[in-house]
Amino acid sequence: MSDKKEDHVLTMKTVNPRAVEMEYAVRGPIVTRSVEITKELAAGVQMPFSSVLPANIGDCHATGQTPIAFIRQVVALCTYPQLLQSDQFPADAKQRAERILAGCKGSSVGSYSASSGVDVIREDIAGYIIKRDGHPANMDDIILSCGASDGIKTVLNLMMTGKDGNEAAGIMIPVPQYPLYSATLTEFNAFPIPYYLNEENKWSLEVSELKRALTAAKGKCLPRAICVINPGNPTGQVLSRKNIEDVIKFAHDEKLILLSDEVYQHNVYAEGSEFFSFKKVMTEMGAPYCNMELASFMSASKGYMGECGFRGGYAEVVNFQPDVRAILLKSISAKLCPPILGQVVIDTIVNPPQKGEPSYEQFESEKNVVLDLLKKKAKLITKLFNSIEGIKCNEVMGAMYAFPRLFLPEKAVAAAKAKNQSPDFFYCYQLLEQTGLCVVPGSGFGEKEGTYHFRITILPPLEEMEGVLEKFKEFHLKFLQQYK
């Protein structure tokens, strides 16, 4: 009898090796096990906990966040325009919906838009950037995307050389980093140039480390770009303006394109911290820096809105040559267009209710409730982790995560290696099995050799987090004792 595998065109020998090699820890084996446990609990299996707390991913609504009313009102009106005749919706929500629908072909969100997005929405994004930065922005530089991730991959694709070895494109990425970047570079057969954030100094980004990383990559690839995540994921740091200026100067001197992941720009909590866009700083530095190639990215999935499922995002791409811009537009045309409802959600974010409009007070109240709670939980989780033996956690200055360091006993490290597991995976798997708390091992984001971490979101409801974190403390101290 023939081997059944031989009856298939695609086997583990023939499938794209880049797809096999690619990893995405945020939805890795521990998350798969958490789904299994949820099903087992529903089937009546007895465990030391009654439910799984998904703290592995920045999915705000999955952890109980209430949708912002104005966003959903505009989406509802655009989806079912007959509701425009109803007196159940405020006038400003109707006005936004009517404007968007007028910009859609056939006045319907069921139609395709231009590949770069609905024009009126791109106009509103440009207006938002002007207001945010205090400098001009052009709708022709705006490209709507299927979440920020799609925009990031689209721009990265432009930088690929199509060659292997020392002629492959090199992209500088932070470590720790959001695994989209390492996964995409694997998929594109590009060369990651890791630069390490300084955990001892609040996960700071130091130019000396950038220079070291780039020097180490010389001769191994063709360096093309530097990616910066600000506020940071998974580390939660917020870059100072001076730090941003230093990175811009470094990128200019080394002739690198700037890729600025700014999806957490609404999520800044630490006293004295402030979000500055790379475009704003670059513009205010003047020539030659203001003429550098820059792509920055924003999403509907984070901030105060957390509308992950709508897959709304955009990229602002500035100072690219006209011929290159034409290639970018050609590459996105193959995808037809990003989801229209995702574009609608983006519009409500960049063109929210203004003072004097009927939805303003409710919108501001709902927005501030979300952000104030996140700030409170950022402080809570930082304080709690730093009060526990064997853990150290930098202040969660922004974004939606803590990235505490674990100081694991040697016996635990040896036990993990005996199972061919990274020590932080070994730890996080047991944490899930014993408490129901689902977090992501730090090794999935990259970390310095010999250090161990995990990423935990600050999204679950405050009272739920307080209870689970007490369970976490019990687990952790028991784990230390077990492997002492």
Image (cartoon, rainbow, N blue to C red):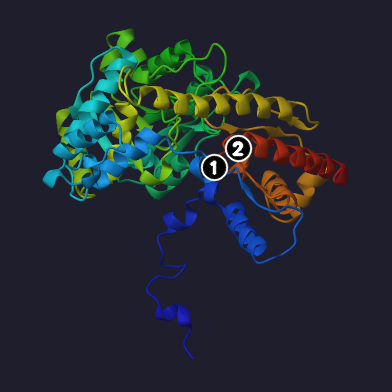
Q: Earlier in the sequence, mark 1 or mark 2?
A: 1
State how far apart marks 1 and 2 are (Cα): 7 Å
Q: Nearer the viewer, residue 93 or 222?
A: 93
- Residue 114 seen in the current view: yes
Q: Amino acid at mark 2?
A: Pro
* Numbered mark located on residue 255 in the image: none
Residue 320 seen in this snapshot: no
291 over 455 or under it: above or below: above
In the image, residue 11 lies at what x, y percent?
44, 70
From the top left corner, tell me how far across and down residue 119 is, in percent. Answer: 17, 34
Q: Amino acid at mark 1?
A: Gly
Q: Residues within 10 Å of mark 1 (few under 14, many from 20)?
A: few
Q: Is 226 on the left or on the right of 287, as rendered? A: right
Q: Which mark is residue 64?
A: 1
Q: Residue at x 78, y 38 (%)?
A: 473
Image marks 1 and 2: residues in contact by CB distance under 8 Å: yes
- Is residue 22 toward the left or the right of residue 471 in the image? left
To which residue does mark 2 refer? 461
Q: Secondary structure at mark 2?
A: loop
Q: Is 90 displayed left or right of 303 in the figure?
A: left
The residue at 43%/18% (across/down) is: 247
Tag 1 secondary structure? loop
